Amino acid sequence: MLEFGREEPARLAIFISGRGSNMKTLVEACLNGEVDAKPVLVLSNSYAAAGLEWASEQGLPIAAIDHRAYDEREAFEKDIQQTLELHNVEFIALAGFMRVLTSWFTDKWEGRMINIHPSLLPKYPGLHTHKRAIEAGDAEAGCSVHWVTEGVDEGAVIDQERVPIEAGDTPETLAERVLAREHILYPRALGKAVEDFYDREEASDDPTSESS
Ligand code: GRF
C-alpha cells in the first residue's frame, strides 16, 4: 500500500501592500498550528508597507518589489516569480495586495493562490466595496476568500463571513466591522484551501485515481 501525504507543510508566501493585519493573522495561525502551512516569505509591492516591519520582527524573510520600477506588468511579475522560486514557495495568500496580476502569473499559480476581498462576492468586485454596499441599501456586508484567477475577484469562493450594515454606518465604520471578520475568516479559509491543495496533490500522485 502506498503511503500518501506530505512530510512538510506547504511553503506559503503572503503578499501585502500596506498595514498587513490579515497577513499577521495568517502568520499567527500557521505558527500556532491552526493552519498546516509554513510562512516562508512576506512580499510587498511597496517598501513602505507597514506589515513588512512586523514580518521582519518575527524573523520572516521579506521582499519588496516596487511595481513603479517596471514599465510592463509581466516584467514585475517575472521578478516576483524569481523571488518565489528562490524561497521554494508552493502556495500564495494575497492579503491586501493592491496590484492586478496578469494571466501570465495567475495561470502559473492556479489552484495555489487565494485572496481576501471585503465584500460578499460575487457582489462588489473591485474597489470601494463598503461604500457601494451602503449606497445600494444592502442589509448586510461581509468578506470572501476566493481562488485567484485571471478575472479580478472572479475565482470560486472558498468561504465567507457576514456582518449587518447598521443605520448610520459609514464606509469606515463598516470597514472596521468587516475587518474584524476578515481576521476570523482568512485563517479558516486558508486552512481549507491548503487541505484542498493537498487532496489534489495526493490524487495526482495516486495511480488508482486517474481521471478520464
Ligand atoms: C482588507 O480589507 C482586505 O480585504 C483588502 O485590503 C484590506 C487589507 O488590510 N483586500 P490589511 O493590510 O490586511 O490590514
Image (cartoon, helix red, strand yellow):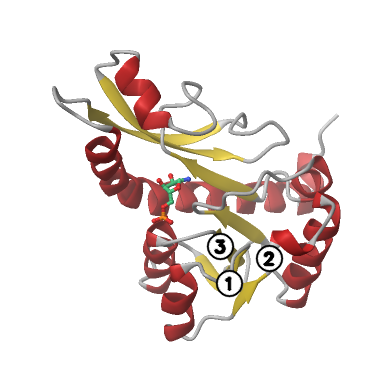
Circle 3 SS class: strand
Q: Earlier in the sequence, mark 1 or mark 3?
A: 3
Q: Earlier in the sequence, mark 1 or mark 2?
A: 1
Can residue 2 be seen? no
**Percent from the top left, x then y, of residue 5?**
62, 62
What is the number of the mark on residue 14?
Answer: 3
Question: Separation of disc 1 and disc 2 at Cα?
Answer: 7 Å
Q: Quadrant of the N terminus?
A: bottom right
Q: Nearer the viewer, residue 204 or 41?
A: 41
Residue 87, picture quadrant: bottom right
Q: Which residue in the protein does label 1 denote? A: 47
Q: Which residue in the protein does label 2 denote? A: 66
The amino acid type, in three-letter code, at marker 2 is Asp
Which class describes the residues within 10 Å of circle 3: few (<14), some (14-19), or many (20+)? many
Above or below for 79 versus 144: below
Can residue 27 be seen? yes
